[in-house]
Image (cartoon, rainbow, N blue to C red):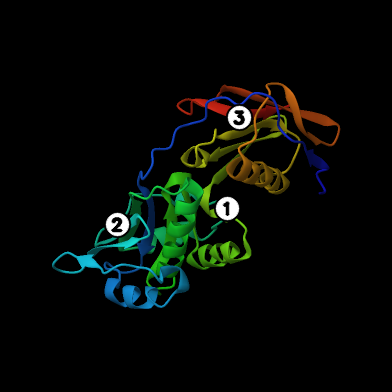
Amino acid sequence: MDAGWRMFSLFGRRPEAPQVKAGEPAIAILLLSQKDFPVSAFLERLRKLSFAAKMSEVKANEDGSVVAFNMGDDVVGIGSMPARYPEVAATAWMFPEAAAAVQAHAGFVTATLTGGRSAPVERRKLLTRVVAAMAEEACVSAVYWGEGTILHRPDVFRQMTALLEKGALPIWLWLDMRVWRNENGTFNLATTGLNKFGRFELEILAVPVEPGPLREFAFSIATTLILDNPIVKDGAESGRFGNSVLRTYLKPSVWEGRGTVLQMKT
């Protein structure tokens, strides 16, 4: 990498990670250019997709705007609402046209998983596939992944979902990796969304690396955390940015309300 970074294994003690309750709801919201989502047309198309081969019969309310069905032991709920969703364009660092897309939306539809006892990452894979299929409808103007507080372009969401078929995780869809610039020219990064995988959120503080390479480094760390849940030793060397040694600590977040985080700093 141009930034000259290297990542090292984390080792030592394993602290108690954030708890994820089995079957807790996982939710995504799709903003619409019209008031209603074409639920019936979507369900007909969904049944033809390979991952939905074992989809159960659908139960619906009287007007068909809310439906539910099983995929494995998860209940998938889809609900269309003819109302505007609260402002979320500020979370769209990968979506430069977000403000216009959000301003023009007229309704939204929720996609929810509940009840499944699979690992959090497997449940997010399922929800991501369902949402990507929904995002093929022309009326979808944006996809909001609430757990990561991040807004996506529908076509980008679909493209990144395709990574699942190659055995890769679409981390960019699931996690916000917000970057701030400090007065001395260094940058901070903080994730949102790792807690939903039973992992500590990640903070990288005051490093001399531009946002692009910094997010790529955080992507590597986040993938390792989700897949391997490595044990952590406070003060262990976890990477380098040029000649700067990056060390890892479990500490209270520097931002209020985030609790204990995996903090990396030089």
Residue in the foreground of this view, choosing between 238 and 198: 198
Helix, strand or loop at mark 3: strand
The residue wearing badge 3 is 262
Labels 2 and 1: the sequence-earlier one: 2
Q: Marks 1 and 3, how far apart in space? A: 19 Å
Residue at far left of view: 62
Helix, strand or loop at mark 1: helix
Q: Marks 2 and 3, how far apart in space? A: 36 Å
Amino acid found under the numbered disc labelled 3: Leu
Amino acid found under the numbered disc labelled 1: Trp
Of circles 2 and 1, which is in front?
Answer: 1
100 lies above or below 13 = below
Labels 2 and 3: the sequence-earlier one: 2
The reply, left or right, for residue 112 in relation to residue 123 is left
Q: Measured from the top left, where is residue 145 in percent x and y?
A: 44, 52
The residue wearing badge 2 is 84
Quadrant of the rendered image containing residue 112:
bottom left
Q: Residues within 10 Å of mark 1 (few under 14, many from 20)?
A: some
Q: Measured from the top left, where is residue 211 in percent x and y?
A: 68, 45
Residue under the point 80% across and 40% down = 6
Helix, strand or loop at mark 2: loop
Q: Measured from the top left, where is residue 168 in percent x and y?
A: 62, 58
Amino acid found under the numbered disc labelled 2: Arg
The residue wearing badge 1 is 172
Residue in the foreground of this view, choosing between 137 and 82: 137
